[in-house]
Image (cartoon, rainbow, N blue to C red):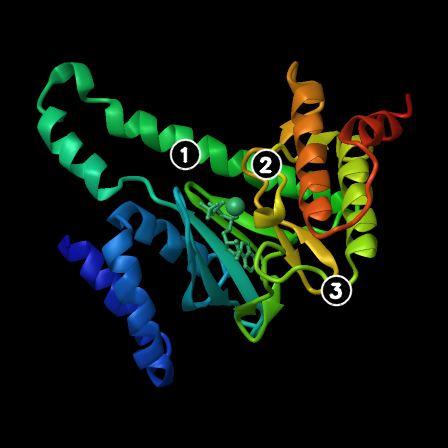
Amino acid sequence: MPADFEALLRKLERRRPERLERDSETYKIMASVFDSSTLLTLYHMINQRIFDIFYGAVSTGKEANIFCALDKQGNYIATKIYRIATTNFKNMYRYIAGDPRFRRIQRERRHIIYAWVSREFKNLQRAHEAGVAVPKPIGFEKNVLAMEFVGEGGVPYPLMKDVPPKEPRQVFERLFEAIKTLYHKAELIHADFSEYNVMLTPEPVLIDFSMATDIANPMSDELLMRDLSQLVRYFRKLGLKTPEPAQLFSELKGE
Ligand SMILES: Nc1ncnc2c1ncn2[C@@H]1O[C@H](COP(=O)(O)OP(=O)(O)OP(=O)(O)O)[C@@H](O)[C@H]1O
Ligand SMILES: [Mg+2]
């Protein structure tokens, strides 16, 4: 662990001595997962008052970790942090860093991730402005995205994959409406729709807009059809009678 990284952690921990124990557990996880540049970004976002302290780890995904943070007003914030370098990548990097042809590799990787995060933020913004139930985006910087926390007391609401809805018909209709509004008002297709990316409050909230794309995308029909097929597949598995995906597709497009 680089020295500046440690200093940064100490600074973060000093902010709330009464929370030290819980916080330092979280920061220990962060120290083991993130590079110093990510820690600096988090520190900068704290200074920007986007959040104040970190509360705990929520999820470890393929590319990103989600942490729960609190802002100065005591609101819970979900923080999605894309990992710049995995352990594997670091090892790879060590081997090839000396090769002048690969000097830019990490930088490029970084910039791809930064662009990805800004797209996810803009997608959430468009969806939110269109009135679709999504976590309200709060801010982003580099590989870190801050958004409204969908949960209570720092505990996230369940994913639809883990806790099937009590009112399948109603939730199915809501989700179809959400996909429709997303298309017509936000001009977006989620493109990764499934029960893994729906949280139930118990009202459905759509999450994970990292793959979402503009309807002008040449693949948009295909992606929309895939989202609708996922919707139908999940609710049919619950025993709900639903229209065919193609029928939903035509209805959505007003054809
Ligand atoms: N705004 C939020 N509020 C509370 N919890 C959240 C929020 N966003 C995401 N989560 C939790 O974190 C998990 C992962 O979030 P998300 O789907 O955005 O990331 P991911 O990178 O796709 O993860 P994975 O690799 O597992 O697919 C979600 O399944 C959910 O449990
Ligand atoms: Mg996901």
Q: CA distance from mark 1 to mark 3?
A: 38 Å
2 vs 1, front mark: 2
Report which residue position mark 3 lands on.
166
Assess disc 1: are there few (<14), some (14-19) or many (≥20) residues with their C-alpha within 10 Å of its C-alpha. some
Say which label, 1 or 3, has the lower sequence index.
1
Three-letter code for the amino acid on which mark 1 is drawn: Ile
Binning the other alpha carbons within 10 Å of mark 2 as few (below 14), some (14 to 19) or many (20 upward) gives: many
Residue at disc 1, secondary structure: helix
Tell me what residue is drawn at x 59 percent, y 40 percent.
209
User: In the displayed structure, does residue 245 sit left or right of residue 61?
Assistant: right
What numbered label is drawn on residue 113?
1
On the rendered image, what quadrant is the N terminus found in? bottom left
Closer to the N terminus: mark 2 or mark 1? 1
- Please say if 169 is above or below 95: below
The Cα atoms of the two marked residues, 3 and 2, are separated by 23 Å
The residue positioned 29% from the left and 51% from the top of the image is 34
> Which residue does the numbered mark 2 point to in the structure image?
192
What residue is at 66 percent from the left and 37 percent from the top? 230
